[in-house]
Amino acid sequence: MSEELDRRQFLKGSAMLAGLAIAPGMLLYDLAHGRSLNEPASSAVRWGMLIDTNQCESGCDDCVKACNKENGLPGGTRPTDEQWMRKVELKDMRTGKATSLPMMCQHCEEPPCVDVCPTGASFKRADGIVLVDRHLCIGCRYCMMACPYKARSFVHEPLHDQKPDVPRGKGTVESCTLCVQRIDRGENTTACAEACSKAGHKAILFGNLNDPNSEISKRIKTVASTQIRADLGLNPGLHYEGL
Amino acid sequence: MKRIQAIFLALVLLASGAAFADVTVPHLDIGKGGHCVNDPKFMKLNHGDLLKHQRTITVHQGVRGRYSLEKCVNCHASRVNNSVLGTDRNFCQGCHVYAAVKIDCFECHSSRPETVSETLTEVAK
């Protein structure tokens, strides 16, 4: 009797496994939860954002504060202070329409900062995130000059008490990493997007542009969005709605 | 004559033994310690290469693998000052001062484990 039960349970279990497996060695579970810690970032994914400027409230800088907290940035606004993210307020002088939006690294598909880097420190990861390898960065700041979005900062002063998962140091260039430490942990959100939802605006939608079933892909398909300086043909990963 | 030779040999041996005893090896505060990712003898010789190899894979491919400076710090930060630096007994600084090899890891990387330092600051508040 017990033997029979075991056999039945075994069959049940294997049927469930077969249901999860869509190909040998590939489980549905993996697709749902992203890659494991030992798996390299893959070009099957392209991380991006859709920012709805209609929802973005003028004067609110919760996203910037969250970014500073997540990455251990001082949050100063002097010209020499590091700033990965900033709020921009625009006004159309003819109609008087005011627009507020967050501005940061646009994570281009063809990043000019990577083109100009003499050491290979500025690079684009397989999943579309544009990063600086600060082991290789010599602080020449060519990338800062090349970036049409003024997204990068240079660290001028020696730093102390950096966050353990966000190493930063004097003499190197840095910018928004799309919270790469969170992505590598398998979290599907960035600090700014999280803070924006928390504030009730839900203006920042983060997700995988390559997955046709992701929320961001579905929304980009249905609403009018634009990329900033789309004329440059860099195909940024950040899309703006309502501009 | 043989006897004198034997005494001389014994003296040389004694002197060399004393010389070894005089060498001040660093007495390290290994912090929490515990089971390391590799044999400690292997790590003593190869940790630099392992970290250098891993850093490229981590930064460029996003693989947060077996070897990580953050994990070293998590286990080996001193319980006295919650860091791998600070005094010549601290885990990283102690050995590197002894070997006269400069470490620049901690100009960018944190020398403190995050969780403990956070609780410490909470206590301080």
Image (cartoon, coloured by chain):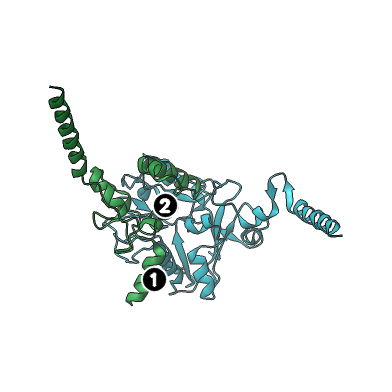
Pick whichever, A121 or A99, lies toward us: A121
Residue A219 visible to the viewer? yes
Pick whichever, A113 or A4, lies toward us: A4
Residue A121 visible to the viewer? no
Pick whichever, A147 or A81, lies toward us: A81
Mark 2 belongs to chain: A
Q: Colour of chain A?
A: cyan
Query: Tag 1: residue type?
Result: Thr
What residue would you read off at disc 2? Answer: A148
Badge 1: residue crowd in 10 Å (few <14, some 14–19, many ≥20): few
Going 67% across and 55% down the picture, which residue do you hit?
A29
Residue A140, image x, y percentages: 31, 45
- Describe the element under mark 2 as helix, strand or loop: loop
Q: Quadrant of the N terminus of chain A?
A: bottom right
Pick whichever, B67 or A100, lies toward us: B67
Tell me: A95 left or right of B22.
right
Badge 2: residue crowd in 10 Å (few <14, some 14–19, many ≥20): some
Query: Tag 2: residue type?
Result: Pro
Residue A48, image x, y percentages: 55, 56
Chain letter for the green part: B
Vertical side of B62 occupied by A71: above or below: below
Residue B70, image x, y percentages: 41, 55
